[in-house]
Amino acid sequence: MNLLEQQLHYPLGDVLPEPGASIEVAPGVKWLRMALPFALDHINLWLLRDEMPSQTTPGEMLQGWTVVDCCITRDEARAQWEQVFARELEGLPILRVVVTHMHPDHIGLAHWLCERWTTATHVCRLWASATDYLSARLGSQSTTGFGGDAAARFFAMHGLTDPDSVEKIRARTGYYAGMVPAVPASYCRIMDGSVITIGGRAWRCISGHGHAPEHIALHSEDAGVLISGDMVLPRISTNVSVYEQEPEANSLALFLASIDKFLPLPESTLVLPSHGKPFTGLHTRIQQLHDHHRDRLAEVMQACAAQPCSAADILPVMFRRPLDLHQTTFAMGEAIAHLHLLWFDGQLQRCVGADGIYRFSPSGG
């Protein structure tokens, strides 16, 4: 446990759910954990005990579960879900699927879950923000943020010109669709301030930006629980990136403003993150994230003051460990996000060189 983690509290200690099993973290709230084939090797998913009005019989309430987030599409994840269906649902159906945002580990199996639990008398519907739903639909039919010609050109403009890396990025045309091959054809829209009644409890939707287009976290005042998705993680900092679809984005400024929306919640709130363990110490963690990015911004500013820097030049400044290609695409997006905040803030200026690469230097320098 690092020094920052020691300032947080983990009510369950080091206990983790077994594959295909759950741990109840609050009344009617179950924690699932599924493996991912990446350096970030797991995702947390949530089962919420629920009831919904029957779609066919007026006055009848259906008993079941709401799923929050899904894992990527892969056989291993489907197998784990089948174990969950057999062991954790108490003989009840899944009534709806809520996704916090459009990234593959969160929405990848939404189509499968919705189809799996739709019957002649009940449609198991996807609930998501409009922006992330539509982004996922687009991504499942093409690519987004991680591969193809547009991504390769964008990263090359920001200094990632190594021919091997550029060619590998260009070749990853089906990266997103490989993990999200389909998205349900219809959905229920949720947005900032929406209140979803789940199992008799009111869950308020809190939108966040910078990590995903329109991320939705869920807060239950009654349960004292925040399902934070990727907006607040206990051990790692959330990836905040700029990609080719919105090349002039100021993602980091959006993210930092978004996490402050959680400050009105009680410090005692049990935070259920998408990665890592449930924890308390929400206000402390928000301050840690602000401090982290303040320090990274200072390092970026110092590097650009020494000489004009591209995002690729910033990688060894921000990331002091070896990066594989998967990690490099995230790291490039993060480096651009930090440069852009300083650029939009007027501390840096951006110029394109004769080689077509953007470089940043102190304004007026």
Image: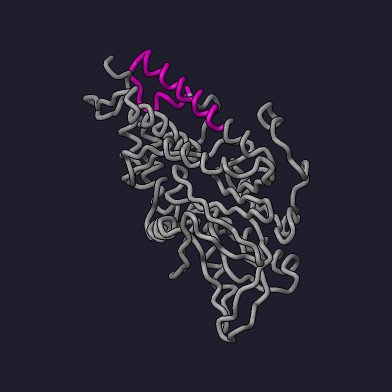
The residue sitting at 60% across, 41% down in the picture is 233
Q: Residue 6, percent across and down?
A: 71, 30
Provide the residue span drawn in magenta: 289-317
Q: Is residue 345 left or right of residue 88?
A: left
Q: Position of residue 135 (x, y in %)?
A: 40, 56
Where does residue 244 sit, x and y in percent of width and height?
A: 34, 43
Q: Who is closer to the viewer here, 172 or 247?
A: 247
Question: Going by the picture, which residue comes out furthest to the bottom?
Answer: 57
Picture quadrant where residue 284 is located: top right
Residue depicted at 66% across the width and 40% down the height: 267
* Residue 353 in view in this figure: yes
Left or right: residue 127 versus residue 156 is right
Residue 176 to residue 304: above or below = below
Residue 345 sits inside the magenta stretch: no
* Total number of numbered discs in the rendering: 0
Q: Is residue 70 left or right of residue 310?
A: right
Q: Please identify the quadrant where the C terminus is shown.
A: top left
Main SS, magenta region, reads helix
Residue in the image at 53% along x and 63% along y = 110
Q: Is 77 drawn above or below residue 278 in the view shown?
A: below
State the scheme by which the image is colored: one colour
Which sits in the foreground, 231 or 268? 268
Q: Is residue 35 visible?
A: no
Q: Residue at image x 51%, y 23%?
A: 295
Residue 60 placement: quadrant: bottom right
Where is the N terminus found, in terms of image quarters? top right
